[in-house]
Image (tube, rainbow, N blue to C red):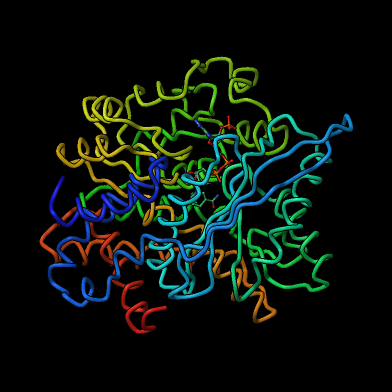
């Protein structure tokens, strides 16, 4: 979709950030959605809110030198993009993956700003990470990297400034190493990171939160179609933190997860994926998904990850990475009877894919709403740290469920009030944008 408003936003953002396609893709989607808001609220143009919101408040890039097990010096690049602090301290995950670059971190930080606003908890948006690849590294190598990364990052973060968490390649092990180094350098024990272990300030249900939240959100999408999970065939890409706990919740609600993947390929198990096997391979052994066949020989394995979308299903949950579900895959899903798709990963569906789902009447849950359960529960972890309390699993899970219901309501209500009924992409962008822009207007030009 093109218009004078979208063209004008994109022309400035493209000229400033020419080599950042993922960031431009994320900005375009938001710009397209908020056009009717800008038309209805003239102060947004007068106060240049859109021009300000697409520019990160601060971008930090730094050298991360460390020594591997063979005594060789390695040099990685670290990033932290503090995008927007209008509604609270910056908050967003750290990604460790060789594909990480400034444009990817900016796209994630931009999305995070609106996602965090949708949770209605007081947190701004940021994201960070490094092109370090944890795959195949020893625990000592990962620790040395994390310590070096924190040696610079610590000056830019703090419990009331910026609170990082996990993302791709950053789980409990990495958060532990990062937290230990922050504590040592600053001589303070604070809730500066979330996703912490339970023995040092973590929250119950944080590990499960993004996957569970995704399923709570999708449950509402299905309910609007007067159906539920019972007997549904479900395909989930990825086999990391988000994918595993989405699969667990789907199975508990009566759905059957028939396929999962990693970056090498995918498994199909018509009897339903045995999640205990996937958890052992991925969480304990840090192995490859094809090892599933060793425990479940009746399953099939295929190389290449995008083939997973050819497996017939009624619900598709992309939970691996950005742009993993393109127009061709969306068309195949539609042809095979898919009625709902919801994004566990950040921006996993390309714009062509989203259009195909919308045109075909498939219910589509965008990432910034559907996967907001992780950061919402991180905000609950921050609350528990501030209060020096810990809530039970059920308390946290029930708050998470309430937050996901509220996010769904906000998206549906915003899309309805702008005449875009059923378009949850527009609803999420509008509701998130309004919350951030109202705070920016209140703060003046800062
Ligand atoms: P993990 O590192 O735990 O798992 C990532 C999974 O995705 C792995 O199975 C990985 O396979 C696969 N994957 C990674 N890169 C690619 C690629 N280029 N192509 C195909 N598959 C790939 O990460 P998470 O589960 O935490 O994150 C997954 C997604 O969810 C990301 O988009 C993240 O931003 C998003 N997200 C995560 C949240 C969280 O709380 N963890 C919160 C909100 C969003 P392999 O092992 O082979 O690399």
Q: For residue 120, which quarter of the picture?
A: bottom left
Residue 98 located left or right of residue 407: right
Residue 9 located left or right of residue 368: left
What's the residue at 65%, 17% (across, down)? 294
For this orientation, the residue located farthest to the right is: 71
Quadrant showing the C terminus: bottom left
Quadrant showing the N terminus: top left
Q: For residue 199, which quarter of the picture?
A: bottom right
Relative to 227, residue 55 above or below:
below
Q: For the image shown, how many numbered marks are present on the structure?
A: 0
Relative to 31, residue 301 above or below:
above
Residue 284 located left or right of residue 138: left
**x, y percentage for residue 99?**
55, 35
What's the residue at 31%, 61% (across, down)? 408
* Closer-to-camera residue (40/73): 73
Residue 78 visible in image: yes
Q: For residue 369, which quarter of the picture?
A: bottom left
Residue 221 visible in image: no
**x, y percentage for residue 139?**
80, 40
* Closer-to-camera residue (297/369): 369
What's the residue at 32%, 47% (across, down)? 14
**x, y percentage for residue 300?**
50, 15
**x, y percentage for residue 442?**
35, 84
For this orientation, the residue located farthest to the left is: 419
For this orientation, the residue located farthest to the front is: 15
């Amino acid at each position: 979709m093109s218009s004078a408003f979208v063209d004008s936003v994109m022309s400035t953002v493209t000229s400033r950030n020419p080599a950042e396609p993922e960031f431009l893709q994320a900005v375009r989607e938001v710009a397209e959605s908020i056009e009717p808001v800008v038309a209805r609220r003239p102060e947004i143009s007068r106060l240049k809110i859109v021009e300000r919101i697409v520019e990160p408040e601060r971008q930090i890039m730094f050298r991360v030198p460390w020594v591997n097990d063979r005594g060789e010096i390695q040099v990685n690049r670290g990033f932290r993009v503090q995008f927007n602090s209008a509604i609270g301290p910056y908050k967003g995950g750290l990604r460790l993956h060789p594909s990480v670059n400034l444009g990817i971190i900016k796209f994630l930080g931009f999305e995070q700003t609106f996602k965090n606003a949708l949770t209605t908890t007081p947190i701004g948006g940021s994201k960070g990470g490094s092109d370090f690849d944890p795959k195949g590294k020893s625990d000592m190598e990962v620790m040395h990297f994390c310590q070096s990364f924190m040696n610079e990052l610590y000056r830019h973060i703090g419990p009331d400034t910026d609170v990082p968490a996990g993302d791709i390649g950053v789980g409990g092990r990495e958060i532990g190493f990062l937290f230990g180094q922050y504590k040592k350098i600053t001589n303070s024990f604070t809730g500066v990171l979330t996703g912490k272990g339970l023995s040092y300030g973590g929250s119950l249900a944080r590990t499960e939160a993004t996957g569970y939240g995704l399923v709570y959100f999708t449950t509402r999408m299905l309910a609007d179609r007067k159906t539920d999970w019972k007997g549904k065939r479900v395909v989930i890409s990825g086999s990391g933190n988000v994918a595993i706990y989405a699969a667990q919740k789907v199975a508990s609600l009566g759905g059957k997860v028939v396929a999962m993947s990693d970056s090498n390929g995918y498994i199909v198990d018509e009897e339903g994926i045995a999640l205990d096997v996937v958890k052992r391979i991925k969480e304990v052994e840090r192995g490859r998904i094809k090892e599933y066949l060793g425990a479940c020989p009746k399953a099939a394995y295929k190389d290449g990850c995008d083939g997973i979308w050819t497996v017939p299903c009624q619900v598709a949950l992309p939970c691996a990475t950005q742009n993993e579900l393109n127009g061709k895959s969306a068309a195949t899903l539609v042809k095979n009877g898919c009625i709902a798709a919801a994004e566990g990963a950040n921006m996993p569906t390309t714009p062509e894919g989203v259009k195909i789902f919308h045109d075909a009447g498939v219910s589509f849950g965008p990432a910034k709403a559907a996967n907001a359960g992780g950061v919402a529960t991180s905000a609950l972890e921050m609350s528990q740290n501030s209060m020096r309390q810990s809530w039970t699993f059920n308390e946290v899970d029930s708050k998470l469920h309430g937050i996901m219901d509220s996010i769904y309501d906000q998206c549906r209500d915003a899309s309805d009030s702008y005449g875009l009924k059923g378009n949850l992409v527009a609803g999420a962008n509008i509701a998130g944008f309004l919350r951030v822009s109202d705070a920016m207007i209140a703060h003046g030009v800062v």
